[in-house]
Amino acid sequence: MPARIQCVVCRGHACIHLLVRDGLLFYDLLVFSFPTEEERFLRANDRPFNLSYHYANNAIKTSKYNIFTFLPLNLFEQLRRLANAYFLFLFVLQLIPQVSSLSWFTTAVPLVLVLSITAVKDASDDINRHKSDNQVNNRRVDVLIDGELRNEKWMNVQVGDIIKLENNQFVTADLLLLSSSEPLNLVYVETAELDGGTVMLTPLLCLSGEVRCEPPNNRLDKFKGTLTLDGQTYALDNDKVLLRGCTLRNTEWCFGLVIFGGPDTKLMQNSGKTRFKRTSIDHLMNVLVLCIFGFLASMCSVLAIGNAIWEVREGSMFTAFLPRDPGVDAPLSSFLSFWSYVIVLNTVVPISLYVSVEIIRLGNSFYIDWDRKMYYPKNDTPAQARTTTLNEELGQIKYIFSDKTGTLTQNIMTFNKCSINGKAYGELFDFSGQRVEITEKTERVDFSWNKLADPKFIFHDHSVVETVREGNPEAQAFFRLLALCHTVMPEEKKEGELYYQAQSPDEGALVTAARNFGFVFRSRTPESITVVEMGRQVTYELLAVLDFNNVRKRMSVIVRSPDGKLTLFCKGADTIIYERLHPACNKLMEVTTGHLNVSDAVALGRTLSRTCRDATAVEDKLQDGVPQTIEQLAKADIKIWVLTGDKQETAENIGYSCNMLREEMKEIFVVAANTAEGVKEELQ
């Protein structure tokens, strides 16, 4: 009977083959590993299909050990220290009667003590990691299963599941956004770096579509894939993905399709695998112990050679009184004496040093937790040493790399000044023309004439309101631009009570300013923007939105007014706007540039230019204690680098205001090249 082979099970990491030959049944089990994932394919809301691909579920693991692996792994890690390995080797030598000159417990007791103290400390750190993992894995989220929402743990969420998130909830996994409560299918998120952002959503409620996309990777700013639904294929990019590590803000609810879960999420891909870390002090002690080993080996070698010489010359005379063991001659006796000397002189290697270092680390971690100066009362957040292994590295930091927005600054913007058609507003002057300092007691502008004004908005220059209410066309065009050129979403829970949800704080500040000066952004749809202009409601047809990015450095909208007039409104960095102005605007540009430079001189965080006649300034406030903190870090000889997208003048003034740059610095080196080669040349 001919042989017939049939593959009956091919699932997971194994394949069972059945072989029928001569009426007999044979089988074999082939175990194999999957090749590297090149493309991810999944079906929405189809768990059996997606489970067949064995994608990782949404459980995460940052701990190093479990109850079974702790002892072997921790011992292996500790024995990577040369001193521990040395004393273990010494303990083995002491178990050999021919070379042992001391009892075995003289080495075993201190070795067990050192290993035990370190093991307890490492176990405590890992228990905290387990608690953190369990807390995250046991968070609850609504999952669409069999047509109904079920409250499941995060760890039970699978690739292809459709989940529902609500306002202020953490994003469960890397999601393809399907639908939201916002009219334009927008979602507002707060990233893990506390820098707010918006994500454009796919305007589809996908219940049975198929997604093909790139495999798991750590690129936070890129995503490529396609969604196939009802025979139609839609392109997917990074703007349609919500990443784990974000928090949903200012959005009542949204639905998302899980694309990557747990260790496959971009957040965990960037975290990397938990590995054993060694501090520079550990490396230094290893080097020192290695030198001590060399010194010990040299001493023992000299003594062993001396023993050999004595055995050859004088030892034979004492054999009558101290007979040698059978088979032991002078060379072998010298070899054994070498190891005996190693045991006798073992105190040269200071095992107590490791005990002292571990106790100091543990105590130092408690001092960090108890430090009142590191307590932040606003959020009731104390300092917390998450590991007791790396504490001493804090005192050896040489460089700090930091982002500006949201780190040095509060990411809270307030409308401060503006320059309209060559006239600056926002400062107060007395009768002699001297600038008056604005304090909390300074009289504020009364906006009671505007029923839709924001009561929290504060401004002190009354001339702006007077100019707008008098019907000045340039001033009204300025605030009309602020009310139209943005991506802000309004929310009106009660009649007249407007809440703006802004992609960036400067947009929110500018739209709020326009609102108080009589140009109230009221509502928007994908095709229109409605503004209340000095009490009169006007609806503009929205023809195009050209988003801001790092290349364009400006944002533009094209609208059609009720009288049919087409207008392009643009806002962006002054250097970018100036390049596009008509030569007839040169004189006005010079005046406006002077106003902008004055704004920079008083350390305003951000300046923007708008069309050929406008410029604005918003104040970017520093975080509490930033100047003092940077000053102390500089005293510790720590070099600080801050990344910012501001222009050079603004960046320099921010540097002075936060004490990164100081007046006593004689010369500031500015790298102003625009290419990699140019920067390299200037640095050289």
Image (cartoon, helix red, strand yellow):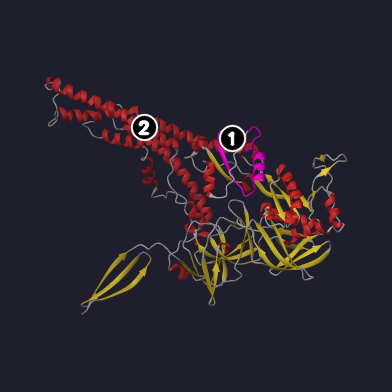
**Is 106 on the left-hand or right-hand side of 576?**
left
Badge 1 crowding class, 10 Å Cα cut-off, few under 14, some 14 to 19, many 20 or more, is: some
Q: Amino acid at mark 1?
A: Ala
| Quadrant of res 623 | top right
Between residue 561 and residue 37, name the one nearer to us: 561
Q: Which circle marks residue 634 in the picture?
A: 1
Badge 2 crowding class, 10 Å Cα cut-off, few under 14, some 14 to 19, many 20 or more, is: many
The residue stretch that appears in magenta: 637-665
Residue 80 lies in the magenta-colored region? no
Question: Is residue 14 shown to the viewer in this render?
Answer: yes
The residue labelled by disc 2 is 289
How far across and how far down the image is residue 6, in percent?
30, 75
Mark pair 1, 2: CA separation: 34 Å
Q: Residue at x 29, y 32 (%)?
A: 104
Q: Residue at x 67, y 52 (%)?
A: 575
SS category of the residue bearing label 2:
helix
**Is 197 on the left-hand or right-hand side of 460?**
left
**Relative vertical location of residue 352 with respect to residue 315 in this rendering, above or below:** below
Mark nearer the viewer, 1 or 2: 1
How far across and how far down the image is residue 92, in percent?
28, 36
Residue 644 lies in the magenta-colored region? yes
Question: Is residue 100 shown to the viewer in this render?
Answer: no
Q: Residue at x 36, y 46 (%)?
A: 72
**Relative vertical location of residue 327 with respect to residue 550 in this rendering, above or below:** above
Q: Amino acid at mark 2?
A: Val
For marks 1 and 2, the one nearer the N-term is 2
